[in-house]
Image (tube, grey):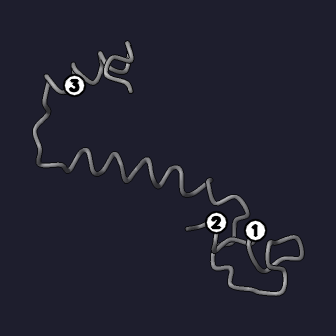
Amino acid sequence: MLVVLSPVVSGSPASLFPGLDFQLFPLENPGLVSVPAGFLAGWAGTVTSPEPPDEAKHAETEVRSLTGAGAV
């Protein structure tokens, strides 16, 4: 969403729509903000989750990620 509101899409001569100006986010590379924000949101969701850790599910996921078992 930040890409649509950045100068890459509108508001500058080199943008996708140079005649329009609806930029609300000042950075041309919104990944500088959105990637850390997504990481922090994922961490916060994990920390605040009321669901207890499931050791069996963790072990199954680890085996599947290391061996590719169950991949279609």
Number of callouts:
3
Numbered badge on residue 8: 1
Q: Is residue 41 above or below residue 43?
A: below
Q: Which residue is mark 3?
A: 58
Ranked by sequence position, the earlier of labels 1 and 2 is 2
Quick one: label 2, few (<14), some, or many (20+) residues within 10 Å?
Answer: some
Q: Which residue is mark 2?
A: 3
- Tell me residue 21's x, y (percent): 74, 86
Quick one: label 3, few (<14), some, or many (20+) residues within 10 Å?
Answer: few
- The answer to whether marks 1 and 2 mark residues whose Cβ atoms lie closer than 8 Å is yes
- Amino acid at the residue labelled 1: Val
Q: Is residue 37 above or below residue 13?
A: above
Please name whichever residue, 57 or 29, is drawn nearer the observer in this view of the structure.
Answer: 57
Q: Give the quarter of the figure containing the N terminus.
A: bottom right
What whole-number distance in Å separates the C-alpha atoms at marks 1 and 2? Answer: 7 Å
Q: Residue at x 37, y 24 (%)?
A: 71
**8 relative position to 30: left or right:** right
- Tell me residue 31's x, y (percent): 61, 54
Residue extending farthest front: 72
Q: Residue at x 50, y 50 (%)?
A: 36
**15 relative position to 3: left or right:** right
* Disc 1 secondary structure class: loop
- Amino acid at the residue labelled 2: Val
**Which quarter of the picture shows residue 11?**
bottom right
